[in-house]
Image: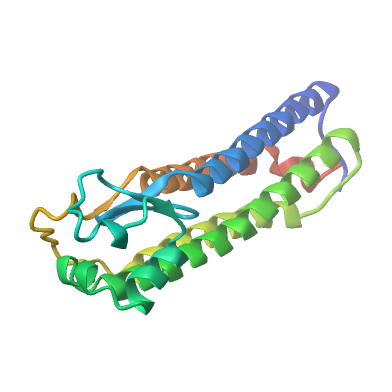
């Protein structure tokens, strides 16, 4: 295809390419932060993050103190509470074992999907950097990849919501033995949604402002 761009047009498109690289890099960092150390939901005696679980309160009845772990992984909570048949926690928080196992599965799905999304972020950044420094480069695939990225991200969100199954998280009553909370989504999931919206905005910008750079010389 013969180019119809002037040198001014090329300079403007190159600026848009650079802005997209910056935005996509910021999105990559934001997703990593979201996965690493933010609580996604609270239930019973814990606040659950993707990588770590924190105990909600400090005031625990001495009779069940040894049944509680302050900070650990969700896998350890399952082993301590479910595989060892912890009757205290199961009595205070009905259906806790099934719910935590569902949550663990949901977290694995989110981590898997987000890992793919992060890989796509790096691929897109690589494509755009290559286009910035190599004038004669065309690839219609670059226009399609952001759509795949958004699709995989929101698939992870839907799998998470489907896996945790809201109706199974019944109200809890710890009867003064310890501090506990009913099921509640926290800042980690809200941040997850915000990142999804930001991803749509970033890729929309890339599509409208830079797509011609990859389909014409």
* Colour treatment of the image: rainbow
Seen at 20% across and 69% down, the residue is 88
Quick check: 209 left or right of 43? right
Image quadrant where residue 210 sits: top right
What percent of the width, then of the height, locates residue 139? 81, 53
Q: Residue at x 81, y 38 (%)?
A: 129
Q: Position of residue 110 (x, y in %)?
A: 50, 61
**Which quadrant holds the C terminus?**
top right
The number of numbered discs placed on residues in the rendered structure image is 0
Q: Nearer the viewer, residue 46 or 60?
A: 60
In the displayed structure image, the side of residue 39 where residue 23 appears, left or right: right
Q: Position of residue 168 (x, y in %)?
A: 22, 72
- Residue under the image location 43 percent in, 62 percent down: 74
Question: Nearest the camera: 200 or 63?
Answer: 63
The residue shown at (67%, 48%) is: 121
* Residue furthest to the front: 62
Extreme top residue here?
Answer: 8
Q: Is residue 167 in view from this perspective?
A: no
Residue 135 position, x and y percent, is 90, 36
**Side (left or right) of 139 relative to 95:** right
Q: Is residue 169 above or below residue 202?
A: below
**Quarter-of-image position of residue 57:** top left
Residue 134 seen in this snapshot: yes
**158 and 19: which is toward the camera:** 158
Q: Is residue 132 left or right of residue 106?
A: right
**Viewer-side residue, 178 vs 26:** 178
């Amino acid at each position: 295809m013969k180019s119809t761009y002037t040198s001014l047009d090329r300079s403007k498109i190159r600026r848009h390419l650079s802005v997209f690289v910056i935005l996509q890099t910021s999105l990559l960092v934001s997703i990593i932060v979201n996965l690493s150390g933010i609580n996604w939901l609270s239930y019973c005696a814990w606040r659950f993050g993707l990588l770590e679980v924190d105990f909600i309160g400090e005031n625990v009845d001495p009779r069940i103190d040894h049944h509680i772990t302050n900070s650990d992984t969700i896998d350890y909570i399952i082993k301590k509470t479910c595989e060892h048949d912890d009757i205290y926690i199961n009595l205070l928080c009905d259906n806790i074992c099934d719910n935590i196992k569902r949550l663990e599965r949901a977290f694995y799905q989110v981590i898997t999907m987000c890992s793919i999304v992060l890989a796509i972020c790096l691929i897109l950044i690589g494509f755009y950097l290559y286009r910035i420094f190599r004038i004669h480069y065309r690839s219609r695939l670059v226009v399609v990849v952001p759509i795949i990225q958004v699709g995989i991200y929101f698939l992870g969100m839907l799998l998470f919501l489907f896996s945790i199954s809201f109706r199974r998280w019944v109200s809890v009553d710890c009867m003064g033995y310890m501090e506990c909370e009913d099921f509640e989504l926290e800042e980690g999931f809200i941040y997850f949604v915000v990142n999804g919206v930001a991803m749509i905005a970033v890729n929309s910008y890339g599509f409208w402002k830079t797509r011609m750079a990859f389909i014409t010389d």
